[in-house]
Amino acid sequence: MATELKQEFGKVGVLFGGRSAEREVSLMSGSGVLAALQSKGIDAHAFDPAERSLADLATEKFDRVFIALHGRFGEDGTLQGALEQMGIPYTGPGVLASAIAMDKAMTKRVWLFNGLSTPRFEMLNARSDWHKIAATLGLPLIVKPAHEGSTLGLTKVSEASQLEAAYQLAAKYDRAVMAEEFISGMELTCPVLGAGDDAYALPVIRIVAPDANYDYQNKYFSNDTKYLCPSELPPEQEKQIQELVLASYRTLGCRGWSRADVMVRASDNKPFLLEINTSPGMTSHSLVPMAAQATGMSYEDLCVTILRMAALDLQPTKDWQQKP
C-alpha cells in the first residue's frame, strides 16, 4: 500500500509556516500533515515559503502540494495563482474561490446575492460615524479585520464608545475592517469535502467555549473548550446546517475541502453563515479531523483523501501555440 501511494502521488510538498499572522498555527498544522503523509509511505517533504522561493517547487520537481498555510499568502489565491503558473496541482479551492473566501465582506456579498443567511455588516474606516454604526447593526456587535482568520484582531463591542478602539486594533492587521451584527446563540462548524455535486458535508461540531469566548487561545491551545461531535442537534437541524454549509461552499466555487462556521440564533433557531475557511487547521485541536473521525476516518486517511483531490483549476490548452 505504501509503495502504491508513493507511486500515485510522486514527490509531495507540504507547504506550511509562511508569512501570515497565522504562522504559528500553520507550523502546527503542517507538521501534523507531513507526519501523517510520511506514515503512509508518501514521499512528502516540508516546504516553508517564508524561507524558500516558490520556484524551488518547480526546479525540484514536486508533483503536487498539500497547502497547510493559513491566512494571507497561503489561502488568499496568491499562492494558488503561482502554483497554477507552475502547473503543480494543489489541495483546496482554486484561485478565485480562495481569493473571495479570504475576503469576509466579499464572501458575504456573494452569499447574500444568492439568498444565503449571514449577519448584517458595515465596512469601517477612521472617519466612520460610530454611533450610526451601532444604531444600524445594534449592540453588541463584532469588529474584525476583513482578511484575517483565527479571531486575530477581533473585538466584541458592547458600547458605541468602544468602536473606535476596536477599529484601531483590527486595522493593525488589515486595511479593510468590518463591523458585523452579533448573533447570540449556538456556535457550530461544519467541514466539507469534494467538489461540485459530489461535495459532501461531514458531521456538524458544536463549540462550547469558556464564557462563550472562542478566541485565539481557546481555539488552539486551551483544553477548556468543549467540542461536541456528534453535535447532539436534532437530526433535521443537523441536516439543515449541512445543507446551508454545502450551499455556501458551492456558491463560492470551492473544491477539495473547506470548513464553514455558523451561528444559530437563540431566539428563533435561524442559522447564519459567519465565514468559510479554505485551508482549515490540522492541529491537535482542529475540527476537520474531529468531524472526519466521527465518520471513522483517521487523521492519516483524511490527509491522504485531501491530497488525492489536489488539482489545477486553470489548466491551459495548447491552442494558443498553434498558428492559424
Image (spheres, grey):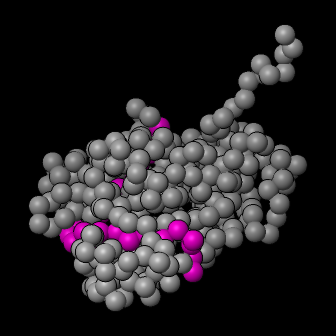
- Percent of width and height locating residue 225: 34, 79
- Judged left or right of residue 115, residue 199 is right
89 falls in the magenta region: no
Name the residue rendered at 52%, 58% in the picture. 102
Name the residue rendered at 38%, 66% in the picture. 122
Residue 76 seen in the figure: yes
Give the residues drawn in magenta, as a range: 172-195
Q: Where is residue 259, by image quadrant?
A: bottom left
Q: Where is residue 13, by image quadrant?
A: bottom right
Name the residue rendered at 59%, 57% in the picture. 75
- Judged left or right of residue 10, residue 191 is left
- Judged left or right of residue 151, residue 183 is left
The single residue placed furthest to the left in the displayed view is 268
- Magenta span: predominant SS is strand
Q: Where is residue 138, by image quadrant?
A: bottom left
Give the camera-side residue of 118 and 83. 118
- Percent of width and height locating residue 236: 15, 48
- Judged left or right of residue 261, residue 139 is left
Give the camera-side residue of 226 and 171. 171
Give the camera-side residue of 263 and 182. 182
Give the camera-side residue of 173 and 29. 173
- Percent of width and height locating residue 56: 84, 54
Residue 296 seen in the figure: no
